């Protein structure tokens, strides 16, 4: 049976582009698979829910009940891809919890394929969190995101051991353009006839990277 | 013939987790293929019996007939381990009864293996019980169980108080039971199944259940920590059994493996 992907987009830092990546990934999965569920664990930051209200649910992990509501969905091998936009407030709580409940082992057993997309930043907290995740997350399930808009092409060497996914920087005016509520990446690809525009290519490049991730899942037991 | 072993789990105070610890002990022996029977002294209704109905009998420890039921059957071949969950307030009287019927002397002379799990609460009064109980402990393995169910610190912040209690009895071994997530604990309560079955996602009659993955994960993590404490004190050796070395090959071993790593079988 095909494995159900679960993408966890995370960073211990705010404003590193988690929600942007979650939006892109949700739209890509919606286009590719026809369905996706986004979980917004991000209530204190700009929110995935605002951008993709039809496919996004809010989740809280401050109490056990909230954890149950989120994790009992994530562990289901129901063929529906899931994307978690994990706010920096919830970073420690989330990974402590999934360590305690043995999420990765149980996911492997149930045919669920979690992938942690760690958005790198060049501060000390990110370095510590990266080391923690590398010790807890299976290597195949761990990807570092190099968001050039944040790191300006200077990804610290410490982050470059595992798999890497690059998000190119957009000019500020295009960044402002895509940050409008209601903007759709797939909608733009469909409507914009000139495929040579910078934004068109940027979206296609990112979708291509995500397709590589999905292919990786297929090749490793999907 | 294996030497019979009796484990008494008790405290003079209620609500400190005696039955919870008894349940983890029964699960541990079950997973290690140690034949066990249990007596619940919460007569007439026993909490332990609700979770382990097949191996538990409710008794009144103050009644001679029930004392006979427990101790006159100790020499039967199987099962060789008897766990007694002593009702709140009855630990000292129960130990006195055991002394009176010559049981403690039998333990002292090595005919019987006798262990006491003394569950401690968070108050000074509870710690005072240690001294009282200590007078009965000749020939017994004595375990002071710090149950963190109430998030107590057991006066570790005050070394003088801590040492005066915990170092009072020579040969007493400390055992730590970590705190279990409240909702996970409640869900197991509602389910009325042993912890091991809960982790394996099974109902009371071994039917498939649908417990929360998160709560099962918390219970598995907690149970593994509790059992690592039992491993540390070599509990199976104490009761005269070798630890199950091939635990993944049979049913209970599979449950134990599930508890220690992967959850549902």
Image (cartoon, rainbow, N blue to C red):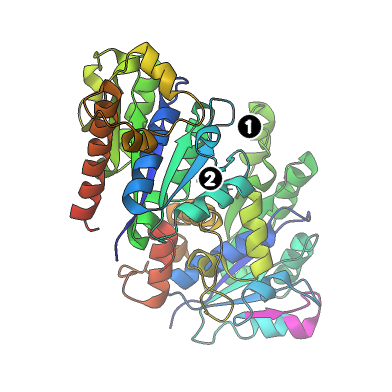
Q: Secondary structure at mark 2?
A: loop
Residue closest to the eye, B198 or B65: B198
Instruction: Indicate whether residue B63 is drawn in magenta.
Output: yes
Would you say A101 lies left or right of B93 here? left
Image position of B11 with respect to B255: above or below:
above
Q: Position of residue B208 (x, y in %)?
A: 51, 75
Residue at x-position 32% and y-position 13%: A171
How many marks can you see?
2
Look at the image and give the residue range highlighted in magenta: B56-66
State the quadrant of the C terminus of chain A: bottom left
Residue at x-position 68% and y-position 66%: B190
Q: Secondary structure at mark 1?
A: loop
Instruction: Indicate whether residue A141 is drawn in magenta.
Output: no
Distance from disc 2 to disc 1, alpha carbons, whole Å, reads 53 Å
Query: Alpha-carbon neighbours of circle 1 within 10 Å: few (<14), some, or many (≥20)?
Result: few
Tell me the mark number nearer the camera, choosing from 2 and 1: 2
């Amino acid at each position: 049976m095909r494995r159900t992907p679960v993408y966890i987009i995370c960073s211990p830092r705010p404003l590193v582009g988690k929600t942007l990546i979650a939006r892109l990934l949700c739209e890509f999965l919606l286009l590719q698979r026809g369905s996706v569920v986004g979980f917004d664990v991000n209530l204190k930051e700009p929110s995935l829910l605002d951008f993709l209200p039809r496919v996004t649910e809010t989740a809280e992990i401050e109490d056990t009940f909230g954890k149950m509501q989120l994790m009992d969905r994530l562990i289901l091998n129901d063929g529906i891809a899931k994307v978690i936009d994990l706010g920096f407030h919830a970073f420690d709580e989330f990974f402590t919890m999934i360590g305690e409940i043995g999420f990765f082992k149980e996911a492997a057993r149930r045919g669920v394929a979690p992938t942690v997309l760690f958005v790198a930043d060049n501060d000390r907290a990110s370095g510590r969190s990266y080391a923690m995740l590398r010790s807890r997350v299976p290597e195949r399930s761990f990807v570092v995101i190099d968001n050039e808009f944040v790191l300006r092409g200077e990804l610290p060497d410490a982050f470059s051991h595992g798999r890497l996914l690059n998000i190119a920087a957009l000019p500020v005016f295009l960044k402002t353009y895509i940050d409008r509520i209601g903007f759709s990446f797939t909608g733009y690809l469909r409507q914009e006839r000139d495929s040579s525009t910078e934004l068109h290519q940027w979206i296609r490049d990112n979708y291509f990277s995500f397709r590589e991730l999905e292919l990786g899942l297929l090749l490793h037991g999907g | 013939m294996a030497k019979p072993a009796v484990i008494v789990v008790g405290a003079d105070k209620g609500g400190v987790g005696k039955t919870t610890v008894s349940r983890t002990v029964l699960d541990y022996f079950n997973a290690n293929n140690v034949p066990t029977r249990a007596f619940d002294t919460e007569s007439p209704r026993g909490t332990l019996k609700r979770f382990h109905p097949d191996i538990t009998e409710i008794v009144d420890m103050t009644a001679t007939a029930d004392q006979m039921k427990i101790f006159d059957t100790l020499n039967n071949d199987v099962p060789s381990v008897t766990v007694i969950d002593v009702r709140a307030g009855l630990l000292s009287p129960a130990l006195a009864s055991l002394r009176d019927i010559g049981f403690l002397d039998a333990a002292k002379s090595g005919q019987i293996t006798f262990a006491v799990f003394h569950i401690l609460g968070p108050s000074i009064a509870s710690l005072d019980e240690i001294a009282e109980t200590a007078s009965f402990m000749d020939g017994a393995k004595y375990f002071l169980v710090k149950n963190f169910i109430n998030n107590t610190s057991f006066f570790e912040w005050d070394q003088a108080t801590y040492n005066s209690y915990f170092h009072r009895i020579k040969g007493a071994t400390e055992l730590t039971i970590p705190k279990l997530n409240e909702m996970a604990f409640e869900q197991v309560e509602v389910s009325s199944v042993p912890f091991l079955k809960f982790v394996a996602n099974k109902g009371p009659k071994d039917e498939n259940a649908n417990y929360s993955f998160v709560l099962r994960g918390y219970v598995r993590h907690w149970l593994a920590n509790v059992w690592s404490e039992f491993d540390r004190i070599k509990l199976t050796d104490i009761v005269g059994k070798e630890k199950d070395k091939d635990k993944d090959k049979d049913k209970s071993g599979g449950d134990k493996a599930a508890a220690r790593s992967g959850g549902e079988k």
